[in-house]
Amino acid sequence: MYLKKGDDLMPTKIHEDPTTDSLETISVTTTFTPTETDIGKKITCTAKLSVQEVESKQRQTMHLLNVNYGPQKTRIIASSGTTLLEDGTLMLHCKTESNPPARIVWKKHLANGTLQSIEENQTLSIPNVQFDDSGVYICEVKNEVTNKMENRTVTVSVQGAPRLPEFSILPFATVNEGEEVTLQCSVESSPAA
């Protein structure tokens, strides 16, 4: 009697329990720590009866092994890059290894220090990005079975031509000769104009 994991024999302990004169129960046991590489491997228990005068008989039972693990090796792939031109499309992909599949949530750090949940999906896509789409994005992954979490961050910068400048004259557009005037021109751009 033996146990196999995939095609590999497993080390076992044999226990015999004679129940009657004609019947005997034999058990084999093993202990091991499964990893993600063991997912889907067949665990087979085979019993073989070999008697000299009789043709050898064999019986077996099999189970497929499932292993819950992760998330691990989480990473962000920015297929559109992390520096984009205004009106472009931001594409961020969050990849992780987990069984069962991890729940993926995209978040963004806001200017006031809080986090904003954006989307629950492996891919975050923002079309027609604007300056205010710049910032730190977080991919948060959680395996609901193992209760493990991982976070990864990426900084995105949106650049573009300067916006229409705002012009002001203080105190008024019409002044008397000899009065002091303050002229102010403001524009938004990234990088700075």
Image (cartoon, rainbow, N blue to C red):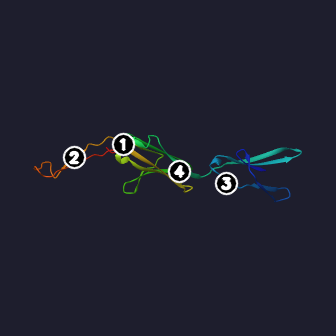
- Residue that mark 3 sits on: 33
Q: Residue 167 carries which label?
A: 2
Residue 167: x and y, percent? 22, 46
Disc 1 from disc 3: Cα separation:
51 Å
The residues bearing labels 4 and 2 have C-alpha atoms spaced at a distance of: 51 Å
**Quadrant of the rendered image containing residue 192:** top left
Q: Please give the name of the residue rendered at 68% of the width and 46% of the height, measured from the top-left corner.
A: 42
Q: Residue at coordinates 35% horizontally, 48% vertically from top-left?
A: 132
How many circles with numbers are drawn on the protein? 4
- Disc number lying in front (4 or 2): 2
The residue that mark 4 highlights is: 102
Q: In this rendering, would 100 be left or right of 29?
A: left
Left-right relation of 145 to 1: left
Nearest to the eye among marks 1 and 4: give it. 1
Q: Distance between the residues labelled 3 and 2?
A: 70 Å
Q: Where is residue 84 in the image (x, y as percent from the top left)?
A: 39, 41
**In the rendered view of the protein, which quadrant contains the C terminus?**
top left
* Disc assigned to residue 36: none
Contact, CB < 8 Å: mark 4 with mark 3?
no
The answer to which of marks 3 and 2 sits earlier in the sequence is 3
Q: Is mark 3 on a helix, strand or loop?
A: loop
Residue 32 position by quadrant: bottom right
User: Which residue is more in the foreground, 52 or 151?
Assistant: 151
Q: Which of marks 1 and 3 is nearer the N terminus?
A: 3
In the displayed structure, does residue 140 sit left or right of residue 58? Answer: left
**Dot label at residue 159:** 1
Q: What residue type is labelled 2?
A: Phe
Whichever of labels 4 and 2 marks the residue nearer the N terminus, that label is 4
